[in-house]
Amino acid sequence: MKPADFNAQIKFAAKKTYYPQCLKYIEDNLTPEFHDLARATLVYYLPSNILDLPSKDERRAAIESIPHDATPSHTRQLVEHGVKTLWQKERNGISR
Amino acid sequence: MGFQDDLKRGVAVEDDLLQRLRAIFPNAKRAEGLHPQWDIEIPELGKTVEVKYDPMSQKTGNIVIEYYHNKPSAFSISIADYWVIVTGNGEYWFSRQGILECILSEGLEPVCFTGTTDRHPKWVFLIPKCVLIRYSNAVLSGQP
């Protein structure tokens, strides 16, 4: 698979926003040898999609849908940091 | 330059930083054993440091932030408080959050390449140095 195609698939997966659905998309659309890489890459595409959710409760639910033991380790922490960072920038008037 | 040479240079860069840190924080120490979550610990501050040597950035203008190399690696697994990137003509200090902020805010996409000494392709973010340093905590002797 070409890197551009792979990245496109991960973008689609991240649009599912809730972690279990993201993983389901990955498992349904990528062959198993890409699953580990896909989970590691998802971390960088999820925060902007979570931030696009309309309410704080939904954003919180999306973050909490990531298990604490998700792989790679610290997945949840990285995504949470990412959402907060982007939110802070938007709040300060700096667009993504 | 082969893998062993790369490794020696990387260790020398870590040693140099460790010696400088010890001048201020005598208890600073290298991580023992295979310890990918950080390279140097500073007990006096309760902080940890990841050290990356990236001399190719002098030629390419890009800093490589690796996150997958046959398995989650580097940025995916390090929990170091600070990342120190040494380019050969500069030393750049970042928080882990600062690097993440750069990747997300700049909308960077990962790329894949196989280094000359690599058996497997690595997935990385290639970040222009002039962009990444906007997210740095400190620049020592560096040039954009």
Image (tube, rainbow, N blue to C red):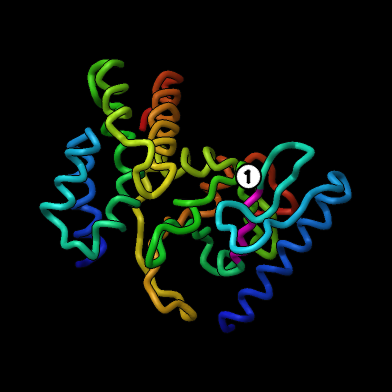
Q: Nearer the viewer, residue B24 or B32?
A: B32
- Relative vertical location of residue B57 with respect to residue B46 in this rendering, above or below: below
On the question of residue B144 being in view, the answer is no
In this image, B16 relative to A95: left or right?
right
Q: Please, what is the three-letter code of the amino acid marked with disc 1?
A: Tyr
Residue B109 is covered by the magenta coloring? no
The x and y percentages for residue B111 are 35, 61
Looking at the rendering, in which quadrant would you find the N terminus of chain A?
bottom left
Name the residue rendered at 35%, 51% in the picture.
A40
Magenta residues, as a range?
B49-54
What residue is rendered at 61% in x and 41% in y? Answer: B81
Residue underneath mark 1: B82
**Position of B103 compared to B59: left or right?**
left
Residue at left offset 47%, top offset 42%? B100
Residue A43 falls in image quadrant: top left
Q: Is residue A8 above or below residue A81?
A: below
**Along the line of sight, the residue nearer the viewer: A87 or A78:** A78
Verify whether residue B52 appears in magenta.
yes
Q: Which is nearer the eye, A94 or A77?
A: A77
Could you say whether the residue bearing mark 1 is in a helix, strand or loop?
Answer: strand
- The picture places residue B104, in percent across and down from the top left corner, at 40, 40
Residue A74 lies, with reference to residue A85, above or below; the image says below
| Residue B134 % position (x, y) | 57, 41
Which of the chains bears the disc numbered 1?
Answer: B
